[in-house]
């Protein structure tokens, strides 16, 4: 089998094992988003061919190129999630091409997404409110205190369907810090669900910590490098450095 298929199978198994282990009070399934940012179309096709349907992308223009190239997979059920920051000038492109936007953190962007969606007569766009769980100042996302108000406003927009919360927790190997942040997010998610019954999604956990996130009640995890191998990333002073690949 190709590495991507093998990697995916490993991630599905780890996900299912984590679901089996966790508390019975978390009843919902856990959706796996395959994060394909910076990866070629062939890699996405490889994952799709072994059953993966939901893909996450960070950069709107890069994603739209892939979405158009893979338009034939739309009727077959491929689903596109924007998981990177969204600027106003890309709101129209995002609204017209994605199925989900997971990074809504201000009303202005939400209103623009809704307007473009309605104008195009598309069904409501699924959105998540991004929460800054770690309190790190450079992180995007709303403070936990602002979740309720922003969510209420979003729920009134005709072009959007509020589905829940997304967060990127601190990048740390310390399991107790991770658990603490995931647990708080689950609390915010449950509180929001009380206020907004359409809310059913808590997107948290990545390659390094998704099993812990599932244990703490994630309903959606976003996994990239474990499936597709390491990415080339911007190093200090924006030099391109290549992280050793596990493929
Ligand atoms: C890149 C990215 C991921 C996936 O990261 P991996 O560590 O490669 O699994 C998940 N979520 C967001 C928001 C990302 O930007």
Image (tube, grey):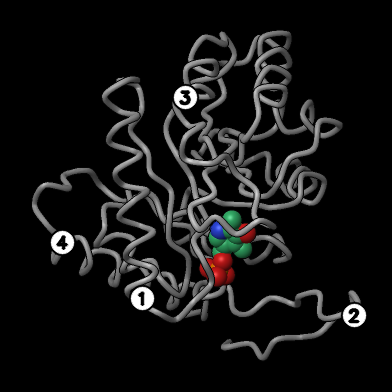
Residue tagged 4: 22
In the rendered structure, are the residues bearing label 3 and label 2 in contact, judged by CB atoms less than 8 Å apart? no
Mark 3 closeness class: few <14, some 14–19, many ≥20 residues within 10 Å: many
Q: Which mark is residue 239?
A: 2
Residue tagged 3: 162
> Ligand 1 is in which quadrant of the figure?
bottom right
Q: Nearer the viewer, residue 133 or 63?
A: 133
Q: CA distance from mark 3 to mark 1?
A: 31 Å
Depth check, mark 3 against mark 1: the one in front is: 3
Q: CA distance from mark 4 to mark 2?
A: 42 Å
Mark 2 closeness class: few <14, some 14–19, many ≥20 residues within 10 Å: few
Which circle's residue, 4 or 2, is located before the other in the chain?
A: 4
In the rendered structure, are the residues bearing label 1 and label 4 in contact, judged by CB atoms less than 8 Å apart? no
SS for callout 2: loop
Residue tagged 1: 10
Q: Is residue 80 above or below residue 148?
A: below
* Residue found 47% across the figure and 49% down from its top: 53
Mark 1 closeness class: few <14, some 14–19, many ≥20 residues within 10 Å: some
In the rendered structure, are the residues bearing label 1 and label 2 in contact, judged by CB atoms less than 8 Å apart? no
SS for callout 3: strand
In the rendered structure, are the residues bearing label 4 and label 2 in contact, judged by CB atoms less than 8 Å apart? no
Q: Is mark 3 within 8 Å of ligand 1?
A: no
Q: Nearer the viewer, residue 10 or 137?
A: 137
Q: CA distance from mark 1 to mark 4?
A: 18 Å
């Amino acid at each position: 089998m190709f590495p991507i298929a093998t990697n995916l199978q490993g991630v599905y198994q780890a996900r299912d094992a984590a679901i089996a282990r966790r508390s019975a009070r978390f009843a919902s399934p856990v959706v796996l988003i395959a994060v394909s940012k910076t990866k070629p179309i062939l890699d996405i096709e490889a994952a799709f061919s072994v059953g993966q349907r939901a893909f996450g992308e960070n950069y709107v223009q890069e994603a739209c190129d892939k979405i158009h190239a893979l338009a034939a997979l739309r009727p077959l059920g491929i689903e596109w999630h924007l998981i990177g920051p969204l600027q106003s000038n890309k709101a129209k492109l995002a609204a017209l091409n994605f199925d989900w936007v997971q990074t809504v953190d201000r009303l202005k962007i939400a209103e623009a997404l809704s307007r473009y969606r309605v104008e195009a007569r598309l069904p409501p766009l699924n959105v998540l409110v991004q929460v800054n769980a770690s309190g790190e100042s450079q992180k995007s996302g709303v403070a936990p205190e602002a979740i309720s108000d922003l969510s209420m406003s979003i729920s009134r927009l005709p072009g959007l369907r509020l589905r829940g919360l997304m967060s990127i927790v601190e990048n740390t190997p310390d399991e107790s810090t991770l658990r603490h942040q995931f647990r708080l997010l689950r609390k915010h998610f449950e509180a929001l669900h009380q206020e907004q019954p359409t809310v059913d999604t808590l997107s948290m956990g990545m390659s390094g910590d998704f099993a812990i996130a599932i244990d703490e009640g994630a309903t959606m995890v976003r996994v990239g490098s474990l499936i597709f191998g390491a990415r080339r990333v911007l190093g200090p002073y924006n030099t391109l450095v290549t992280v050793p690949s596990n493929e």
